[in-house]
Image (tube, coloured by chain):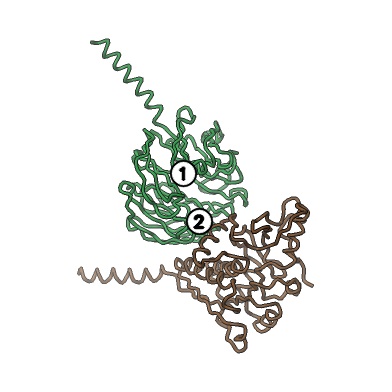
Chain colours: A brown, B green
Amino acid sequence: MLVRKFCYLIFILFFSSLSIAAELIEIDFVYIGEREHPSLLGVNQGIDESNLQGQFLNQKYNLDVITSDKIDGYDFSKYIAVLTSLNSKQLKNLAKQLSNTLIFNLADESNKLRHSCIGNILHITPSNKMKSDALEQLKIKKPESNATAQSWHYSFVKFAARDLNKRFKKNYQVKMNDHSWAGWAAVKMTSDTVARTQITNSKEMLNYLKNELSFDGQKGSDMNFRITGQLRQLILLVENDKIVTEAPIRGVAKPPTLDSLGILECS
Amino acid sequence: MRISSIFLSLILFLSNVVVANADGRIFVTNERSNTVSVIDAKSLTIESTIEIGKRPRGIGLSPDNTELYVAVSEENKIVVVDPDTLKILREFEAGSDPETFGVHPNGNIYISNEDDAKATVFDPKTGKKIAEIKVGLEPEGVAVSPTGERVIVTSESTNMLHVIKTPENIIENNILVGSRPRAAIFNNSGNIAYATAEISGEVVKVDIVKGKIIQTASTGDSKSKPKDVILSKDENVIYVAGGRANKVVVMDANTLEIIKEIPVGKRVWGLAMSGNGEYIFTTNGVSGTVSVIDTGKNEVIKTIKVGEFPWGVVVKDN
């Protein structure tokens, strides 16, 4: 009698534990570019963090890395997104080839690429125009300044940037820069979306990111995408390796929003 | 003989009155002064300032009120102070960058280790580490249910409330909430918790047992970055430290509707309530002050200057 009760108990526990555990979701990314490119370090950081979060949600993230010469004939069907440090010409070709796949541009800054509004490319790194607009704003406020415009800096501490810089440096022994931040951000926004929506299909993910996303990139909240596929974001103005200010610059930026930086329309 | 015994009773009576005054105290960590301000509860004035160490943040009391714990973040330690004599009793290593902690009814301390994606459990009597629990990135808030069955640790970057079952100290559930959950508080029976979300300026109400969000509501300002949240004694009202909105937001605990907004000092993060629920003390970091709120009127009745960048606050009633 006692043995029977015991078996019954084990049976109940086994099945109840099955129903509690969420089904495993496995997500695959591919990175196309040179292995030494800093964006790959950021991508790896993003994958590690996504797997940490994934541990609690029964989600697993994998990354394959290939160079651009391997694109022809490669099977991209299993990937939720392609992360690239390719140039605009290579990106255009890839976007045509993989028309239903989400492609992240982590490195190319050309304005023309943004103007061409290619539907399946999301630009994480800022365009040249975003940077030049930020510098123009600074010139109005501080005419004598000799700054550069960047999307990230290793000394940035606001918006929990300090924590991200700290753990990246701890893991890779180099400072996080524009490209590594872009790699991290692309992976993070994707895995955050998987965590919240369980979307595993590339086209659906592209759609969600373009239209629904409000992203916390540890660079200020509410980052989202423009019609051009460009991620709206703060631009840091850096002089002598120190952050001088952030654009949009209060009192100077017109409009006084992130849309004072960069290209707003398709050509 | 009789006169001297009257005299003796008078002395004792008077000394009791003096001691009763000193019993009620509010302790505040001043993050940039490296001190703890001691406020006398009766006069609401600064009684004393304790030099404590570099970057003190989290603060708490033992269940029997005989020990005051201060997380001295930059020195990776908890300092133990006698809350009556104000003498430093001892200290112990508390893992990397200890910030926020909760004290369990059994006396153990649960600390969130911001840089290490974990929470650590210490016995403050011996300084011994009892357990390490892996949580998500940037763990911050810690809340202990009043009867001690569960502990919540929030991980800001992973956007979760991790529900830890005690005494086993294992994670029972992980609840995805809005961006950057910071502080949390349980209701009296420990089945519901409220947490503030930094990025969205929201409060989320969560069913801890089912592991589900019951409701989310704005604290009124999406840019404000709210921090501490506490519950009234009758559980009908929650108070939220509104961060850069510079106000304490009073919300209905059932509907999450905003009842009132009480302006306090700048960058209000910390909240603590007196034992009878009549007063709330806020730490206004940028102003360097503590506001005293009368919860009957929901008004500030006094503002007390403390050290630089007051962070945490705890009330010792007697």
Q: Position of residue A15 (x, y in %)?
A: 36, 71
Residue type, numbered disc 2: Ile
Write down the quadrant of residue A31 in the picture.
bottom right
Q: Residue at x 45, y 32 (%)?
A: B48
Q: Is residue B138 left or right of residue A146?
A: left
Q: Nearer the viewer, residue B231 or A100?
A: A100
Query: Is residue B298 visible in the rendered structure shown here?
Result: yes
* Residue B73, numbered circle: none
Dot 1: within a 10 Å radius of its alpha carbon, few (fewer than 14), some, or many (20 or more) residues? Answer: few
Residue B189 visible in the picture: no
Residue at left offset 54%, top offset 40%: B308
Pointer 1 chain: B
Residue under numbered circle 2 = B214
Q: Which label is found at residue B235?
A: 1
Give the answer, above or below, for where B255 lies relative to A65. above
Q: Secondary structure at mark 1?
A: loop
Coordinates of residue A158 in the picture (x, y in percent): 59, 54
